[in-house]
Image (spheres, grey):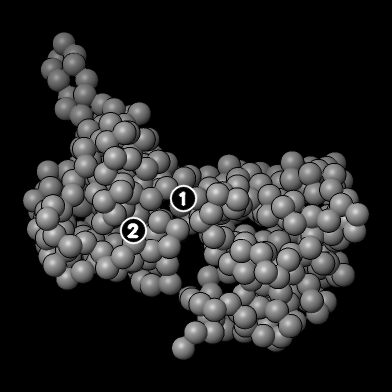
Amino acid sequence: MKIAVLRETADAEPRVAATPETVKQFIGLGATLAVEAGAGAGANISDAAYTEAGATVGDRAATIADADLIIGVQGPAAADLPGVKSGALLAAILSPFADRARIDGYAAAGVTAMAMEFMPRITRAQSMDVLSSQSNLAGYKAVIDAAEAYGRAFPMMMTAAGTISAARVFVMGVGVAGLQAIATARRLGALVSATDVRSATKEQIESLGAKAIFVENVKGIEGEGSGGYATEMSDDYKAAQAALVSSHIAKQDIVITTALIPGRPAPRLITDAQLASMRPGSVVVDLAVESGGNVEGSRVGETAIVHGVKIIGHKNAAGRLAADASALYSRNVFNLVNAFWDKDAKTAAFTADDEIVKGVKLTEGGKVVHERLTAG
């Protein structure tokens, strides 16, 4: 099996889908690796490092030529796969709901596209879960970005000149990113509180030493989504949560929002009026800004100042830690391939009826086949 590693062309995307470590692992399985020149530059990996690991390095056309599996971080347009052979596999983050035309393009090109972000949340697939690996880094980086923008110390400090109060950090949305944000803010000495629409997260929040802020005695979401994801909240819950957040947020120095609903725009968690209640100099980090934003007034790729509050809307938060993000992402991809590797044939045999394969496969045989894209 020939595996092609592409250089990312998307804006603000410094990550790479394979590192020298995983190149060696793929070669150890019996695969051959071709890496597009400059693929690792954003993660400080030189072409020479790939060559030393056993890969060939060349231009995109040479890299893709005769490739059985093409791996990337963000999926390229079908037009950016020159000479791709019919039946070739593509594994990347494909964002099918945001760019359906690209998925149709893969089908038309005869590419079997696999969306890494569709990985089922099952025990067997944990080591392949790119959303978890990347969200973990995003949650950490959100706190670091907030600390830099805040301009004050996080921990309480008692000095001869007086006492500095600890920063108050409020995390909204307690998935992987939120839990890491809580842990990081706690390590830096902040007073941390957090909330989520899923009642099961209360124990997780408290286990990290943070205060859980929850709506009580009101029906919450219409049903927790599969794999532990949240789905849409009821109107009663939205009203109760808004009132609770309004009273709590006014006392916070830093707010980090992480709430996402797969296949839907990000839910609005903070309104302009709530921002106005915060003290000037406070900081809000919107990790959902690229999906529509949790915060009114947040802007993709910018830091907006609204009512004296800084709203940070960095693109690709995980990519801001490109070396670590690439290392984790590339291991996710390797773990997927390795799980289906046929040692005798020296190729990956993605069994059609396997739960993981059915979860990630979007196109096959010239058609879009995933039920989430064909329903209705």
User: Relative to residue 193, is residue 300 depicted above or below?
Assistant: below
Q: Residue at x 18, y 16 (%)?
A: 158
Q: Is residue 115 visible?
A: no
Front residue (pair 174, 181): 174
User: Relative to residue 109, is residue 2 depicted above or below?
Assistant: above
Q: Residue at x 70, y 79 (%)?
A: 364
Front residue (pair 223, 90): 223
Q: Sequence order check: which comes first, mark 2 or mark 1?
A: 1
Residue type, mark 1 in image = Ser
Indicate the secondary structure of the residue bearing disc 2.
loop
Quadrant of the snapshot with the N terminus: bottom right
Disc 1: CA contacts within 10 A as few (<14), some (14-19) or many (>=20): many
Q: Is residue 211 left or right of residue 100?
A: left
Please give the residue where the numbered disc 1 appears in the rendered image: 135
Residue type, mark 2 in image = Ala
Separation of disc 2 and disc 1 at Cα?
11 Å
Please give the residue where the numbered disc 2 appears in the rendered image: 259
Q: Residue at x 86, y 70 (%)?
A: 65
Q: Is residue 347 visible?
A: yes
Residue 70 lies in what quarter of the image? bottom right
